[in-house]
Image: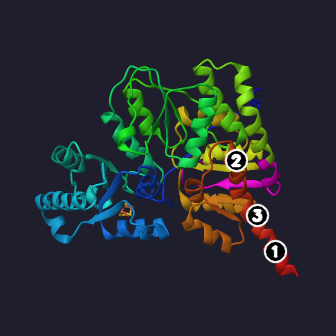
């Protein structure tokens, strides 16, 4: 096996940096998938009714399943006197923990309103941690729209946990990034077959399984938006294994290869373990990507998954990328994906939405990947769109999901073709 590096990747492509009006979710949305992953955690947003409504809208039917998140809504009197807000927060937390004794980790999540009135949630978390120890550990991070964009909420959450993780000198592999349980199990099974272990996960499913970290820890990221977590782990002495992200057959193989090389896994064993799932993934991608071959794709910035996904769509599904927009570009994280992405597309960071819409209209791509706020208006103009949010909620990592990942992009094109055919009849 060899990685076929295009003669010119995109690592040295000048990045178009834009600032202006943005169309993105705030970091609170991360709570939707994080609370499902961490089974004994509760996420308490300290915010306004806007924040509560956002969570309800994003969680959809999940809000009827006694979810482990809620909003402590700041009232007018809280805005007038901060001492009251702190006392009230302490009371709300005590009431919540008495009612839900299964909660072992409590996250106080900052929002725009809590930040604007400078409510010190870091201090509150320390105070409440001392009160409710050892049964409950209280953390704090910001999911506000002023500080965080969409998936950055997960980054802020994980980064907040890193300084409190126990220390170790053991040589362990740490996999960082929330994945659905079934995908996490596939990942662990592949690593076990390669003889790599012990393997720890961040986030862990339960507080009791939290990893320890130290100078002999090596870590691999499964999500490209974990810049702050990467920095926090590096500060604890852990070493990052840079690799393309495990999307598609090629990405998964390259990701596993980087870890296998670090742990001295023999080439033969690697081939033996990966041959069958690789073949399955290639077949599934080939079936799902028929509609994608030869088509063009334009990415608006949303989740930071854009660069690895553009790499997958261009190299494994035969698409051409016109523009790849990302809210933030962290070269230390997505550099290996940029190396593989064939040169050609505009790589843009940040957003000035009107200017970007002009570029998108001029390019008239076959498929536009964007947030919910832009999708329907663009559809009404005749463009075919893919909502980026689904890429975060759907299992898309590793071999067994590679066909589904291609399917997420081909479905809107297929639907458009069917509707066009029906209209013609
Ligand atoms: S945190 Fe800010 S951007 Fe997010 S819902 Fe609340 S007010 Fe809106």
Can I make out residue 364 in this image? Answer: no
The residue wearing badge 1 is 420
Dot 2 lies on which element? Answer: helix
Can residue 213 be seen from the camera position used here?
yes
- Return the disc, 2 or 1, that comes first in the chain's sequence: 2
Q: Could you tell me which residue is drawn at 43 percent across and 42 percent down?
A: 204
Spatial CA distance of label 3 from label 1 is 11 Å
Left or right side of 12 for 329? left
Task: Estimate how packed mark 2 is, as few (under 14), some (14 to 19) or many (20 or more) residues with alpha carbons within 10 Å.
Answer: many
Percent coordinates x, y for residue 280 in the rendering: 77, 43
Query: x%, y% of residue 329?
Result: 53, 41
Q: Residue 54: x, y in percent?
A: 42, 67
Q: Residues within 10 Å of mark 3 (few under 14, many from 20)?
A: many
Quarter of the picture containing the N terminus is top right
The residue identified by callout 3 is 413
Please, which residue is most extreme toward the right here?
425
Question: Residue 218: image x %, image y %?
Answer: 49, 25
- Mark 3 or mark 1: which comes first in sequence? 3
Q: CA distance from mark 2 to mark 1?
A: 28 Å
What kind of element bears circle 3?
A: helix
Q: Are marks 3 and 2 in contact (CB under 8 Å)?
A: no
The quadrant of the image that shows the C terminus is: bottom right
For residue 369, which quarter of the picture?
bottom right
Q: Which residue is mark 2?
A: 402
Magenta-highlighted residues: 284-305
Q: Secondary structure at mark 1?
A: helix
Measure how far apart labels 3 and 2 are at the Cα level: 18 Å
Q: Earlier in the sequence, mark 3 or mark 2?
A: 2
Residue 55: name its quadrant.
bottom left
In-image side of 6 versus 102 (left or right):
right
Q: Identify the residue shown where x is 37% and y is 59%.
A: 68
């Amino acid at each position: 096996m060899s990685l076929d590096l295009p003669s010119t990747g995109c690592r040295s492509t000048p990045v178009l940096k834009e600032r202006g009006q943005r169309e993105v979710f705030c970091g609170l949305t991360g709570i939707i998938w994080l609370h499902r992953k961490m089974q004994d955690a509760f996420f308490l947003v300290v915010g306004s009714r806007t924040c509560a409504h956002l969570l309800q809208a994003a969680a959809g039917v999940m809000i009827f399943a006694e979810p482990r998140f809620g909003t402590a809504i700041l009232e007018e009197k809280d805005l007038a006197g901060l001492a009251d807000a702190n006392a009230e927060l302490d009371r709300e937390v005590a009431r919540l923990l008495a009612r839900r004794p299964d909660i072992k980790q409590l996250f106080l999540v900052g929002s725009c309103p809590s930040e604007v009135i400078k409510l010190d949630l870091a201090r509150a978390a320390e105070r409440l941690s001392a009160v409710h120890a050892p049964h409950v550990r209280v953390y704090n991070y910001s999911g506000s729209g002023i500080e965080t964009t969409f998936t950055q909420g997960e980054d802020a959450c994980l980064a907040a946990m890193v300084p409190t993780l126990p220390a170790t000198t053991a040589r362990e592999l740490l996999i960082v990034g929330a994945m659905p349980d079934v995908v996490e199990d596939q990942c662990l099974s592949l690593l076990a077959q390669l003889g790599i272990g012990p393997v720890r996960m961040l986030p862990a499913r339960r507080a009791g399984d939290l990893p320890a970290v130290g100078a002999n820890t090596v870590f691999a990221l499964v999500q490209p938006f974990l810049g702050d977590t990467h920095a926090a782990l590096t500060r604890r002495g852990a070493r990052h294994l840079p690799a393309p992200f495990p999307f598609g057959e090629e990405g998964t193989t390259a990701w596993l290869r980087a870890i296998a090389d670090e742990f001295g896994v023999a080439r033969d064993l690697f081939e033996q373990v990966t041959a069958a799932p690789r073949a399955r993934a290639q077949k599934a991608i080939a079936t799902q990507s028929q509609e994608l071959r030869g088509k063009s794709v334009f990415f608006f910035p949303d989740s930071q998954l854009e660069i690895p996904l553009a790499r997958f769509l261009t190299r494994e599904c035969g698409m051409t990328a016109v523009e790849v927009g990302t809210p933030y570009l962290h070269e230390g994280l997505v550099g290996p994906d940029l190396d593989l992405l064939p040169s050609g597309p505009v790589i843009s960071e940040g957003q000035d939405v009107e200017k970007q819409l002009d570029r998108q209209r001029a390019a008239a791509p076959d498929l536009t990947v964007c947030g919910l706020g832009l999708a329907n208006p663009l559809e009404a103009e005749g463009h075919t769109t893919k909502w980026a949010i689904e890429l975060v909620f759907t299992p898309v990592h590793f071999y067994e999901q590679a066909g589904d990942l291609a399917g997420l992009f081909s479905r809107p094109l297929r639907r458009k073709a069917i509707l066009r055919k029906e209209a013609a009849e």
